[in-house]
Image: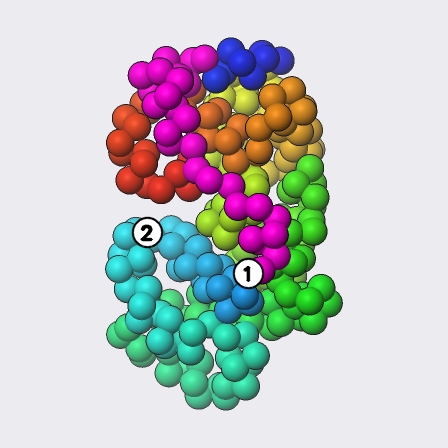
Amino acid sequence: MRPFETIRARAAKRKGGEAELVSVLPDVPSRGVLARLEDHRVLSQMAQRIFSAGFVWRVVESKWPGFEAAFLGFEPKRLLFQPDEYWAGLAEDARIVRNPQKIMAVRHNAQFVSEVADEHGSFGRFLSDWPTADQVGLLAVLARRGARLGARTGQYFLRFIGKDCFITSGDVVACLRDAGLDISENPTSKKDLARIQEQFNKWAAETGLPLTHLSRICAMSIGENYDAETLRKRGGVDE
């Protein structure tokens, strides 16, 4: 495997220097910040990532105040008290993207968030306590117990909520394969995901960097070369 310093040097060169590279690396919240997250913010972020999947993100973002109102501030326990008629009515609510399957995923995930909060004190505490070195295990929990939180939707949920993580975007996968990791172009198998986790863990030990920065630098080292200003406008969350 290629050492990460080589990948970082290539990314820095493409971005116009080390200072520009560092300027587009996102902040990674501390475990304490993550643990203090309120459950309604967790459910809101889950919902936003689900509605954004396969859709134009900026459209969902522009409508999000309407989502917040329609879904009662995403308070899990409040949503769980709502009758079937409330959920059916959301499919006709112009304030949101009216996708019945995704609407019902919010109902399911309200139960998921509530159950995990009961088990761990809060969903944020559950996320904070989960070891970064086992992101694949956390993604498996999201996919198994949540609704529509599998694949990269779960990864983007972790990134946007502030959990240190990698994202298996096309550029990140291309970087890993170019560095010598034996994985498929679409690495969704348990074997491939385990290899990706192991490699990011090795790079973290080698560099002392969080997975978020390793993943981001990896993406910037290959593929389309977006300028630093464009990446800053994206908020440093999209690989």
Picture residue at 70% right of the left edge, 44% below the top: 131
Query: Which residue bears the numbered disc 1?
Result: 37
Q: Please give the name of the residue rendered at 50% of the width and 88% of the height, measured from the top-left corner.
A: 83
- Residue 147 place in picture, x, y as percent: 56, 62
Q: Nearer the viewer, residue 232 or 215?
A: 232
Would you say 90 lies left or right of 113 here? left
Which class describes the residues within 10 Å of circle 2: few (<14), some (14-19), or many (20+)? few
- Mark pair 1, 2: CA separation: 23 Å
Which residues, given as a range, are shown in magenta?
9-36
Mark 1 lies on a secondary structure that is: loop
Viewer-closest of 110 and 102: 110
Image coords of residue 85 (percent x, y): 44, 88
Of the two numbered discs 1 and 2 in the rendering, the one whose residue sits closer to the viewer: 1
Asked whether residue 166 is drawn in magenta, I would say no
Q: Which residue is mark 2?
A: 57
Q: Quadrant of residue 197?
A: top right
